[in-house]
Protein backbone atom coordinates (compact mmCIF):
# COMPACT_ATOMS: atom_id res chain seq x y z
CA UNK A 1 0.00 0.00 0.00
CA UNK A 2 1.40 3.38 -1.04
CA UNK A 3 2.37 5.87 1.65
CA UNK A 4 2.44 9.64 1.58
CA UNK A 5 6.23 9.64 1.21
CA UNK A 6 5.84 7.50 -1.94
CA UNK A 7 3.53 10.14 -3.39
CA UNK A 8 6.02 12.87 -2.48
CA UNK A 9 8.89 11.03 -4.18
CA UNK A 10 6.91 10.37 -7.35
CA UNK A 11 5.72 13.99 -7.57
CA UNK A 12 9.14 15.39 -6.72
CA UNK A 13 7.88 17.41 -3.77
CA UNK A 14 8.05 17.26 0.00
CA UNK A 15 5.70 15.29 2.23
CA UNK A 16 4.49 18.62 3.62
CA UNK A 17 3.49 19.77 0.13
CA UNK A 18 1.53 16.56 -0.47
CA UNK A 19 -0.23 17.09 2.85
CA UNK A 20 -1.15 20.66 1.92
CA UNK A 21 -2.63 19.55 -1.39
CA UNK A 22 -4.70 16.80 0.23
CA UNK A 23 -5.97 19.21 2.86
CA UNK A 24 -7.12 21.73 0.26
CA UNK A 25 -4.33 24.22 0.93
CA UNK A 26 -3.20 23.95 -2.67
CA UNK A 27 0.09 25.45 -3.81
CA UNK A 28 0.49 26.51 -7.45
CA UNK A 29 -1.65 24.65 -9.98
CA UNK A 30 1.29 22.82 -11.62
CA UNK A 31 2.43 21.36 -8.28
CA UNK A 32 -1.11 20.39 -7.32
CA UNK A 33 -1.58 18.57 -10.62
CA UNK A 34 1.67 16.63 -10.16
CA UNK A 35 0.68 15.58 -6.66
CA UNK A 36 -2.82 14.50 -7.72
CA UNK A 37 -1.40 12.57 -10.67
CA UNK A 38 0.95 10.74 -8.29
CA UNK A 39 -1.94 10.01 -5.90
CA UNK A 40 -3.93 8.50 -8.78
CA UNK A 41 -1.02 6.52 -10.21
CA UNK A 42 -0.08 4.98 -6.85
CA UNK A 43 -3.64 4.47 -5.64
CA UNK A 44 -2.82 6.37 -2.46
CA UNK A 45 -5.67 6.88 -0.02
CA UNK A 46 -5.18 9.19 2.98
CA UNK A 47 -5.80 7.72 6.40
CA UNK A 48 -8.59 10.06 7.43
CA UNK A 49 -8.86 8.61 10.92
CA UNK A 50 -5.23 9.38 11.68
CA UNK A 51 -5.51 12.75 10.02
CA UNK A 52 -8.55 13.60 12.12
CA UNK A 53 -6.65 12.77 15.32
CA UNK A 54 -3.82 15.11 14.27
CA UNK A 55 -5.83 17.97 12.83
CA UNK A 56 -9.35 17.63 14.28
CA UNK A 57 -10.50 17.16 10.68
CA UNK A 58 -12.15 14.17 9.05
CA UNK A 59 -11.46 14.88 5.38
CA UNK A 60 -15.21 14.68 4.79
CA UNK A 61 -17.51 17.35 3.40
CA UNK A 62 -21.29 17.50 3.25
CA UNK A 63 -23.54 18.56 0.39
CA UNK A 64 -27.30 18.93 0.70
CA UNK A 65 -29.00 19.40 -2.67
CA UNK A 66 -32.53 20.74 -2.99
CA UNK A 67 -33.67 18.16 -5.56
CA UNK A 68 -31.47 15.48 -7.12
CA UNK A 69 -34.18 14.55 -9.65
CA UNK A 70 -33.61 17.94 -11.29
CA UNK A 71 -30.89 17.55 -13.98
CA UNK A 72 -29.34 20.91 -13.08
CA UNK A 73 -28.78 19.87 -9.47
CA UNK A 74 -27.63 16.39 -10.47
CA UNK A 75 -24.85 17.89 -12.60
CA UNK A 76 -24.05 20.41 -9.88
CA UNK A 77 -23.62 17.64 -7.29
CA UNK A 78 -21.44 15.66 -9.70
CA UNK A 79 -19.20 18.70 -10.24
CA UNK A 80 -18.78 19.24 -6.49
CA UNK A 81 -18.02 15.55 -5.91
CA UNK A 82 -15.48 15.48 -8.73
CA UNK A 83 -13.68 18.57 -7.38
CA UNK A 84 -13.72 17.23 -3.81
CA UNK A 85 -12.36 13.83 -4.80
CA UNK A 86 -9.59 15.47 -6.80
CA UNK A 87 -8.42 17.20 -3.62
CA UNK A 88 -8.57 14.10 -1.44
CA UNK A 89 -11.91 14.78 0.26
CA UNK A 90 -14.86 12.46 0.64
CA UNK A 91 -18.31 13.93 -0.01
CA UNK A 92 -21.57 12.85 1.62
CA UNK A 93 -24.64 13.95 -0.37
CA UNK A 94 -28.17 14.38 0.92
CA UNK A 95 -31.26 15.00 -1.23
CA UNK A 96 -33.74 17.43 0.35
CA UNK A 97 -36.36 16.74 -2.35
CA UNK A 98 -37.46 20.39 -1.97
CA UNK A 99 -38.62 19.66 1.59
CA UNK A 100 -37.23 21.81 4.38
CA UNK A 101 -37.75 19.17 7.07
CA UNK A 102 -35.85 16.58 5.04
CA UNK A 103 -33.08 19.10 4.42
CA UNK A 104 -32.76 19.77 8.15
CA UNK A 105 -32.62 16.04 8.93
CA UNK A 106 -29.70 15.64 6.55
CA UNK A 107 -27.90 18.65 7.98
CA UNK A 108 -28.20 17.26 11.53
CA UNK A 109 -26.89 13.89 10.37
CA UNK A 110 -23.93 15.48 8.60
CA UNK A 111 -23.04 17.60 11.62
CA UNK A 112 -23.12 14.46 13.76
CA UNK A 113 -20.60 12.92 11.34
CA UNK A 114 -18.19 15.79 12.16
CA UNK A 115 -17.84 16.97 8.58
CA UNK A 116 -15.21 19.63 7.94
CA UNK A 117 -17.62 21.87 6.04
CA UNK A 118 -21.08 22.00 4.48
CA UNK A 119 -22.50 23.07 1.11
CA UNK A 120 -26.25 23.64 0.90
CA UNK A 121 -28.50 24.36 -2.05
CA UNK A 122 -31.46 25.23 0.09
CA UNK A 123 -34.97 23.87 -0.26
CA UNK A 124 -37.61 26.59 -0.31
CA UNK A 125 -36.59 29.74 1.49
CA UNK A 126 -34.28 28.00 3.93
CA UNK A 127 -34.78 27.33 7.62
CA UNK A 128 -33.50 28.27 11.06
CA UNK A 129 -31.29 25.17 10.89
CA UNK A 130 -28.93 26.98 8.53
CA UNK A 131 -28.43 29.76 11.08
CA UNK A 132 -27.67 27.07 13.66
CA UNK A 133 -24.94 25.71 11.37
CA UNK A 134 -23.35 29.17 11.23
CA UNK A 135 -23.65 29.56 15.01
CA UNK A 136 -21.98 26.16 15.53
CA UNK A 137 -18.86 27.33 13.72
CA UNK A 138 -19.14 24.71 10.96
CA UNK A 139 -17.97 26.31 7.69
CA UNK A 140 -21.00 26.82 5.45
CA UNK A 141 -21.36 27.89 1.82
CA UNK A 142 -24.70 28.31 0.05
CA UNK A 143 -24.97 27.01 -3.49
CA UNK A 144 -27.27 28.38 -6.23
CA UNK A 145 -29.85 29.81 -3.80
CA UNK A 146 -29.38 32.68 -1.40
CA UNK A 147 -31.07 32.42 2.01
CA UNK A 148 -31.96 35.73 3.68
CA UNK A 149 -30.60 36.07 7.20
CA UNK A 150 -27.90 33.40 6.83
CA UNK A 151 -24.38 34.80 7.15
CA UNK A 152 -22.59 32.64 4.60
CA UNK A 153 -21.20 33.24 1.12
CA UNK A 154 -23.31 32.06 -1.81
CA UNK A 155 -21.99 30.72 -5.11
CA UNK A 156 -24.54 31.12 -7.90
CA UNK A 157 -25.12 32.24 -11.46
CA UNK A 158 -25.94 35.80 -12.45
CA UNK A 159 -28.78 35.76 -14.98
CA UNK A 160 -29.04 39.51 -15.56
CA UNK A 161 -27.13 39.63 -18.85
CA UNK A 162 -28.78 36.45 -20.18
CA UNK A 163 -32.28 37.74 -19.41
CA UNK A 164 -31.42 41.08 -21.00
CA UNK A 165 -30.34 39.19 -24.13
CA UNK A 166 -33.52 37.11 -24.02
CA UNK A 167 -35.75 40.20 -23.88
CA UNK A 168 -33.95 41.65 -26.91
CA UNK A 169 -34.23 38.29 -28.70
CA UNK A 170 -37.99 38.03 -28.15
CA UNK A 171 -38.51 41.66 -29.19
CA UNK A 172 -36.56 41.10 -32.41
CA UNK A 173 -38.75 38.08 -33.21
CA UNK A 174 -41.92 40.10 -32.69
CA UNK A 175 -43.01 38.37 -29.48
CA UNK A 176 -44.94 41.11 -27.65
CA UNK A 177 -47.00 39.12 -25.11
CA UNK A 178 -44.47 37.21 -22.99
CA UNK A 179 -45.32 35.30 -19.83
CA UNK A 180 -43.19 33.70 -17.13
CA UNK A 181 -43.52 30.58 -14.99
CA UNK A 182 -41.66 31.08 -11.72
CA UNK A 183 -40.95 29.26 -8.49
CA UNK A 184 -43.40 29.57 -5.58
CA UNK A 185 -43.95 33.18 -4.51
CA UNK A 186 -41.42 34.42 -2.00
CA UNK A 187 -38.59 32.22 -3.28
CA UNK A 188 -35.59 34.57 -3.64
CA UNK A 189 -34.33 33.00 -6.88
CA UNK A 190 -37.76 33.09 -8.49
CA UNK A 191 -38.45 36.65 -7.39
CA UNK A 192 -35.08 37.79 -8.73
CA UNK A 193 -35.57 36.17 -12.14
CA UNK A 194 -39.04 37.68 -12.44
CA UNK A 195 -37.85 41.22 -11.72
CA UNK A 196 -34.82 40.94 -13.99
CA UNK A 197 -36.97 39.68 -16.87
CA UNK A 198 -39.65 42.33 -16.32
CA UNK A 199 -37.03 45.11 -16.29
CA UNK A 200 -35.32 43.76 -19.40
CA UNK A 201 -38.61 43.60 -21.32
CA UNK A 202 -39.53 47.14 -20.29
CA UNK A 203 -36.42 48.43 -22.06
CA UNK A 204 -38.09 47.26 -25.31
CA UNK A 205 -41.50 48.67 -24.45
CA UNK A 206 -42.88 45.23 -23.62
CA UNK A 207 -45.03 44.80 -20.51
CA UNK A 208 -45.15 41.77 -18.25
CA UNK A 209 -48.43 42.25 -16.34
CA UNK A 210 -49.30 40.20 -13.28
CA UNK A 211 -51.84 38.08 -15.18
CA UNK A 212 -48.96 36.73 -17.29
CA UNK A 213 -46.89 35.82 -14.22
CA UNK A 214 -47.54 32.34 -12.89
CA UNK A 215 -46.10 31.04 -9.60
CA UNK A 216 -46.07 27.27 -9.35
CA UNK A 217 -47.01 25.40 -6.16
CA UNK A 218 -43.82 23.36 -6.60
CA UNK A 219 -40.78 23.02 -8.86
CA UNK A 220 -42.12 19.97 -10.66
CA UNK A 221 -43.69 19.27 -14.09
CA UNK A 222 -47.14 19.25 -12.49
CA UNK A 223 -46.66 22.84 -11.34
CA UNK A 224 -45.46 23.97 -14.76
CA UNK A 225 -48.43 22.35 -16.46
CA UNK A 226 -50.87 23.91 -14.00
CA UNK A 227 -49.52 27.42 -14.68
CA UNK A 228 -49.41 26.92 -18.45
CA UNK A 229 -53.05 25.83 -18.35
CA UNK A 230 -54.01 29.10 -16.65
CA UNK A 231 -51.95 31.18 -19.08
CA UNK A 232 -53.55 29.54 -22.11
CA UNK A 233 -57.01 30.20 -20.69
CA UNK A 234 -56.42 33.98 -20.55
CA UNK A 235 -58.64 36.08 -22.86
CA UNK A 236 -55.44 37.03 -24.68
CA UNK A 237 -52.93 34.19 -24.17
CA UNK A 238 -49.18 34.89 -24.28
CA UNK A 239 -47.16 34.34 -27.43
CA UNK A 240 -43.99 33.41 -25.51
CA UNK A 241 -43.34 31.74 -22.16
CA UNK A 242 -40.17 31.62 -20.07
CA UNK A 243 -40.14 28.68 -17.65
CA UNK A 244 -37.56 29.42 -14.98
CA UNK A 245 -36.79 25.76 -14.23
CA UNK A 246 -36.30 22.79 -16.54
CA UNK A 247 -38.80 20.49 -14.77
CA UNK A 248 -41.51 23.17 -14.89
CA UNK A 249 -40.78 23.56 -18.60
CA UNK A 250 -41.53 19.87 -19.18
CA UNK A 251 -44.95 20.33 -17.62
CA UNK A 252 -45.58 23.42 -19.74
CA UNK A 253 -44.75 21.43 -22.86
CA UNK A 254 -47.14 18.66 -21.79
CA UNK A 255 -50.01 21.14 -21.59
CA UNK A 256 -49.20 22.65 -25.00
CA UNK A 257 -49.17 19.20 -26.60
CA UNK A 258 -52.39 18.19 -24.84
CA UNK A 259 -54.09 21.15 -26.52
CA UNK A 260 -52.60 20.44 -29.90
CA UNK A 261 -50.44 23.56 -29.82
CA UNK A 262 -47.02 23.63 -31.44
CA UNK A 263 -43.74 25.24 -30.43
CA UNK A 264 -42.83 27.74 -31.86
CA UNK A 265 -45.77 28.15 -34.28
CA UNK A 266 -48.38 28.69 -31.57
CA UNK A 267 -46.12 29.53 -28.64
CA UNK A 268 -42.47 30.41 -28.12
CA UNK A 269 -40.89 28.55 -25.21
CA UNK A 270 -37.66 29.36 -23.36
CA UNK A 271 -36.18 27.42 -20.44
CA UNK A 272 -33.98 28.76 -17.65
CA UNK A 273 -31.47 25.92 -17.09
CA UNK A 274 -30.11 24.20 -20.15
CA UNK A 275 -29.73 20.42 -20.15
CA UNK A 276 -27.99 18.37 -22.86
CA UNK A 277 -31.09 16.85 -24.45
CA UNK A 278 -32.76 20.24 -25.04
CA UNK A 279 -30.60 20.53 -28.17
CA UNK A 280 -31.97 17.23 -29.52
CA UNK A 281 -35.73 17.50 -29.09
CA UNK A 282 -38.08 18.91 -31.76
CA UNK A 283 -37.81 21.83 -31.82
CA UNK A 284 -34.52 22.33 -29.99
CA UNK A 285 -35.21 24.59 -27.01
CA UNK A 286 -33.78 28.05 -26.60
CA UNK A 287 -32.44 28.18 -23.06
CA UNK A 288 -30.49 30.14 -20.49
CA UNK A 289 -27.47 28.06 -19.60
CA UNK A 290 -25.88 28.29 -16.19
CA UNK A 291 -22.15 27.44 -15.82
CA UNK A 292 -23.06 24.38 -13.77
CA UNK A 293 -19.71 22.63 -13.43
CA UNK A 294 -17.91 25.91 -12.82
CA UNK A 295 -20.39 26.67 -10.05
CA UNK A 296 -19.69 23.32 -8.40
CA UNK A 297 -15.94 23.82 -8.50
CA UNK A 298 -16.18 27.41 -7.26
CA UNK A 299 -18.42 26.34 -4.38
CA UNK A 300 -15.99 23.62 -3.32
CA UNK A 301 -13.01 25.98 -3.34
CA UNK A 302 -14.96 28.66 -1.48
CA UNK A 303 -15.80 26.11 1.21
CA UNK A 304 -12.16 25.04 1.51
CA UNK A 305 -11.19 28.67 2.03
CA UNK A 306 -13.69 28.89 4.88
CA UNK A 307 -12.30 25.69 6.39
CA UNK A 308 -8.86 27.29 6.34
CA UNK A 309 -10.19 30.22 8.34
CA UNK A 310 -10.39 32.74 5.54
CA UNK A 311 -13.49 34.81 4.76
CA UNK A 312 -14.22 34.51 1.03
CA UNK A 313 -17.02 36.54 -0.45
CA UNK A 314 -19.94 35.35 -2.54
CA UNK A 315 -19.29 34.29 -6.14
CA UNK A 316 -21.38 35.24 -9.17
CA UNK A 317 -20.70 33.52 -12.51
CA UNK A 318 -22.51 34.70 -15.65
CA UNK A 319 -25.29 32.68 -17.28
CA UNK A 320 -25.75 32.95 -21.05
CA UNK A 321 -28.52 32.75 -23.60
CA UNK A 322 -28.37 29.79 -26.00
CA UNK A 323 -30.61 30.40 -29.01
CA UNK A 324 -32.02 27.42 -30.87
CA UNK A 325 -35.43 27.11 -32.57
CA UNK A 326 -38.22 27.25 -29.98
CA UNK A 327 -38.97 30.97 -30.35
CA UNK A 328 -39.39 31.10 -34.13
CA UNK A 329 -35.74 31.78 -34.84
CA UNK A 330 -34.68 31.75 -38.51
CA UNK A 331 -34.78 28.25 -39.94
CA UNK A 332 -37.77 27.04 -37.90
CA UNK A 333 -40.72 25.17 -39.36
CA UNK A 334 -42.78 28.35 -39.30
CA UNK A 335 -40.41 30.24 -41.61
CA UNK A 336 -39.81 27.22 -43.84
CA UNK A 337 -43.57 26.85 -44.31
CA UNK A 338 -43.98 30.52 -45.14
CA UNK A 339 -41.21 30.30 -47.74
CA UNK A 340 -42.87 27.25 -49.37
CA UNK A 341 -46.26 29.00 -49.45
CA UNK A 342 -44.69 32.13 -50.95
CA UNK A 343 -43.03 30.14 -53.73
CA UNK A 344 -46.12 28.12 -54.68
Image: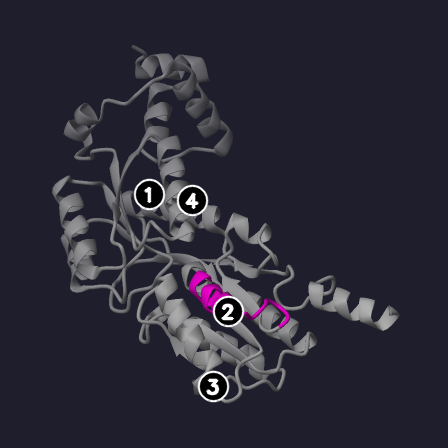
Q: Nearer the viewer, mark 1 or mark 2?
A: 2
Residue at numbered disc 2? 256
Nearest-to-viewer mark from 1 and 4 = 4
Give how far apart the Cα atoms at labels 4 and 2 are.
Answer: 37 Å
Q: Earlier in the sequence, mark 1 or mark 4?
A: 4
- Real-space CA distance between mark 3 and mark 2, rounded to the nearest whole angstrom: 14 Å
Q: Sequence order check: which comes first, mark 4 or mark 2?
A: 2
The residue mark sitting in front, 3 or 4, is: 3
Residue that appears at 35% across and 50% down: 69
Residue 38, position as x, y percentages in the image: 43, 18
Mark drawn on residue 48 = none
- Residue on which disc 4 sits: 297
Left or right of residue 326, residue 3 in this image: left
Q: CA distance from mark 3 to mark 4?
A: 43 Å
Residue highlighted by disc 3: 234
In this picture, which residue range is highlighted in magenta? 250-265
Mark 2, secondary structure of its residue: helix
Front residue of this view, candidates 76 and 325: 325
Amino acid sequence: MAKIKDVAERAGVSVATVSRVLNGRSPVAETRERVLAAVEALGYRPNNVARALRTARTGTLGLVISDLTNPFFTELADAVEDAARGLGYSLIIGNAAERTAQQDDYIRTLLDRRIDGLLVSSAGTGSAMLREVVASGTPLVLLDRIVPGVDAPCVRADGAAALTDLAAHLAALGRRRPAIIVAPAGTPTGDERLELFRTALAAHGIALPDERVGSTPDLQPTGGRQVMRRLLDLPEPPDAVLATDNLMALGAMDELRARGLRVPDDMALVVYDDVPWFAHIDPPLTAIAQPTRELGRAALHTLLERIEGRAPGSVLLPARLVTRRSCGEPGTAREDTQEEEGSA
